[in-house]
Amino acid sequence: MKKQPEITERTKAILTDAFWQLYCQKDIHNISVKEITDKGGFNRSTFYQYFTDVYDVLNQIEDSLIDCVISHVRESLKLEIMIIF
């Protein structure tokens, strides 16, 4: 059975958002996979398709943010170079 990329990304985004809501309320050491999956409306096996543990969710969020910042900096530098020349 083929997975649908849109659904896969949406599921991961829902779980990430559920984690983030909990993370804004309490320390990461006090967040469980069960809390994330309950809040996101999925079961634990779905969580483990995307993440190894609670810390992996945070690491993936951080990596995504870093990639976004790097991309924006590169675009900004390209624009500056174009303006100079």
Image: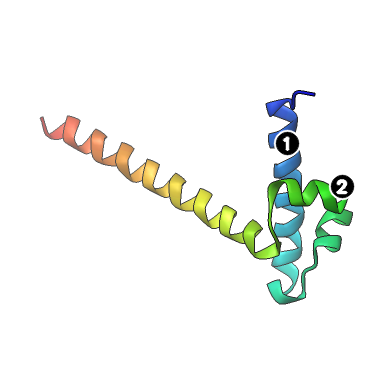
Q: Quadrant of the C terminus?
A: top left
Three-letter residue code for mark 2: Phe
Q: Residue 25: x, y in percent?
A: 75, 69
Q: Circle 2 — which element?
A: loop
Left or right relative to 68: residue 27: right
Disc 1 marks which amino acid?
Arg
Tell me where residue 41 appears, x and y as whole percent: 88, 47
The residue under the point 52% across, 48% down is 64
**Residue ranking furthest to the front:** 1
Please give the name of the residue rendered at 70% of the width and 51% of the height, measured from the top-left corner: 16
The residue shown at (68%, 35%) is: 9
What percent of the width, then of the height, locates residue 84? 12, 34
Identify which residue is drawn at 77% across, 75% down: 30
Residue 74's label in the rendered image is none
Q: Regarding mark 1 in the picture, which secondary structure is present there?
A: helix
Tag 2 and tag 1, C-beta contact below 8 Å: no
Residue 73 falls left or right of residue 27:
left
Which quarter of the picture shows residue 79? top left
**Mark 2, other Cα within 10 Å: few <14 / some 14–19 / many ≥20:** some
Q: How many marks?
A: 2
Q: Which mark is residue 10?
A: 1
Badge 2 is on which residue?
42
* Pick the front one: 74 or 85: 74
Q: Nearer the viewer, residue 39 or 24?
A: 39
In which quarter of the view is residue 81 placed?
Answer: top left
- N-terminal-most mark, 2 or 1: 1
Residue 59 placement: quadrant: bottom right
Task: Work out whether residue 58 or residue 3 is closer to the camera in this orientation and state it.
Answer: 3
Q: Quadrant of the N terminus?
A: top right
Residue 51: x percent and y percent? 69, 53
